[in-house]
Image (tube, grey):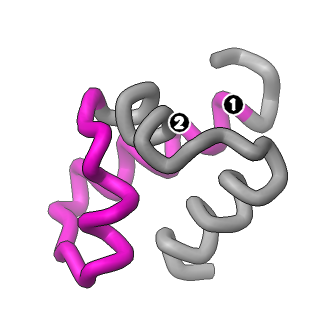
């Protein structure tokens, strides 16, 4: 699954605003808006977001 799809699914399930997700995951409130607009991510950034999603789904965050 593409990272944007994973993020969108997480936002829908948790009802967290995109800006809050960006702040919590990366310290960047514009992250989701930029991703939706086609922002290309470095592999390290992708890894950080996937790690955040995994941790939050397991209740660690």
- Left or right of residue 56: residue 38: left
* Above or below for 6 versus 26: below
Q: Residue 39 appears in which quarter of the rendering?
A: bottom left
Q: Are marks 1 and 2 in contact (CB under 8 Å)?
A: yes
- Name the residue: 53% across, 36% down: 52
Question: Helix or strand or loop: what does disc 1 sit on?
Answer: helix
What residue is shown with label 2?
A: 52
As rendered, which of 58 and 6 lies closer to the eye?
6
Separation of disc 1 and disc 2 at Cα? 6 Å
Q: Position of residue 10 (x, y in %)?
A: 70, 54
What residue is shown with label 1?
A: 56
* Circle 1 crowding by C-alpha within 10 Å: few under 14, some 14–19, many from 20: few
Q: Position of residue 7 (x, y in %)?
A: 57, 60
- Name the residue: 23% across, 61% down: 43
* Circle 2 crowding by C-alpha within 10 Å: few under 14, some 14–19, many from 20: some
Q: Position of residue 13 (x, y in %)?
A: 83, 52
Q: Quadrant of the C terminus?
A: top right
Q: In the drawing, what numbered circle is on residue 19?
A: none
- Name the residue: 25% across, 66% down: 34
The magenta region covers: 27-56
Question: Helix or strand or loop: what does disc 2 sit on?
Answer: helix
As rendered, which of 44 and 33 lies closer to the eye?
33
- Left or right of residue 9: residue 7: left
- Quick check: is 57 in the magenta stretch? no
- Quick check: is 40 in the magenta stretch? yes
Q: Position of residue 4 (x, y in %)?
A: 49, 72
- Left or right of residue 17: residue 10: right
Q: Quadrant of the N terminus?
A: bottom right
* Above or below for 8 versus 21: below
* Above or below for 13 versus 43: above
Main SS of residues in magenta: helix
- Name the residue: 18% across, 75% down: 40
């Amino acid at each position: 699954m593409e990272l944007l799809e994973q993020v969108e699914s997480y936002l829908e399930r948790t009802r967290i605003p995109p800006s809050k997700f960006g702040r919590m995951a990366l310290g960047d409130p514009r992250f989701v808006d930029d991703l939706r607009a086609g922002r290309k991510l470095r592999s390290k950034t992708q890894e950080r977001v996937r790690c955040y999603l995994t941790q939050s789904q397991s209740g660690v965050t």
